[in-house]
Amino acid sequence: MAFELPQLPYAYDALTPHIDTKTMEIHHGKHHGGYTTKLNMAIEGSEMASNSIENILKKMDMNNSALRNNGGGYFNHCLFWEIMSPDGGGNPLGTLAEAIDSTFGSFDSFKETFSNAAATRFGSGWAWLCAHEGGKLEVCSSANQDNPLMPGIGCGGSPILGIDVWEHAYYLNYQNRRPDYISAFFNLVNWERVGELFDQSK
Ligand code: MN3
């Protein structure tokens, strides 16, 4: 069974002005499309081919760079599209809001921690909000297309929110102003979906 590039749950121009149309077209069609094709090439004929993407990441041989980069790239972007929405922004709700307050002190303090992790990730990578079993939350970042589900990344739990800080995610609109892109991202976060992922992770 081959993995498929998921359709975006909104139009390419739906996230403007925070993320521009051209960036979305290239990011989804070319970058995520490329990871999908190369992931399928990397698993073809192997026992990995019958696994879920989550299991592929959890069982990752970190020396297998084709599988690591493209399996991570496939999963990370699937999550990324899903946790944004043209109707996003605002504040987290329900049990997730309570967990954010109890872990970070306040939503503003969480935003600062998460934004700092995203801004200080050197080179290409991602910043994450992860939920551990029992509901404890953690912010971390990872390089390239690595993911907290992979072994030995230095943070764990299930990623429920992630921001792509590769230059391909923001350079056309923001050039070197990564902090502006990170701040705009919070206008797009689909907290309802992130809350569902949090509840499923417990
Ligand atoms: Mn990307």
Image (spheres, helix red, strand yellow):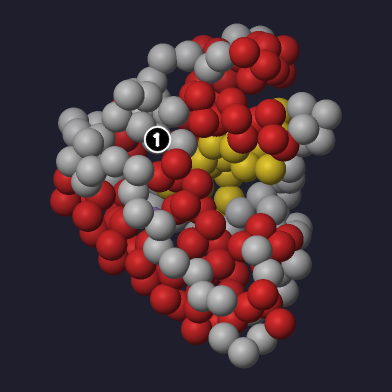
**Residue 49 pos. (x, y %):** 63, 78
Tell me which residue sits at (41%, 15%) in the image. Answer: 90
Q: Is residue 138 in view from this perspective?
A: no
* SS class, disc 1: loop
Foreground pick, 134 / 111: 134
**Residue 1 pos. (x, y %):** 56, 76
Foreground pick, 175 / 9: 9
**Which residue type does callout 1 highlight?**
Met
Q: Is residue 200 in view from this perspective?
A: yes
Residue 188, placed above or below residue 165: above
Query: Is 198 placed left or right of 12 in the picture?
Result: right
Tell me which residue sits at (42%, 76%) in the image. Answer: 37
Q: Quadrant holding ligand 1?
A: bottom left
Tell me which residue sits at (42%, 28%) in the image. Answer: 189
**Residue 28 pos. (x, y %):** 31, 57
**Residue 178 pos. (x, y %):** 33, 38
Query: Is 89 placed left or right of 194 in the picture?
Result: left
Residue on which disc 1 sits: 84
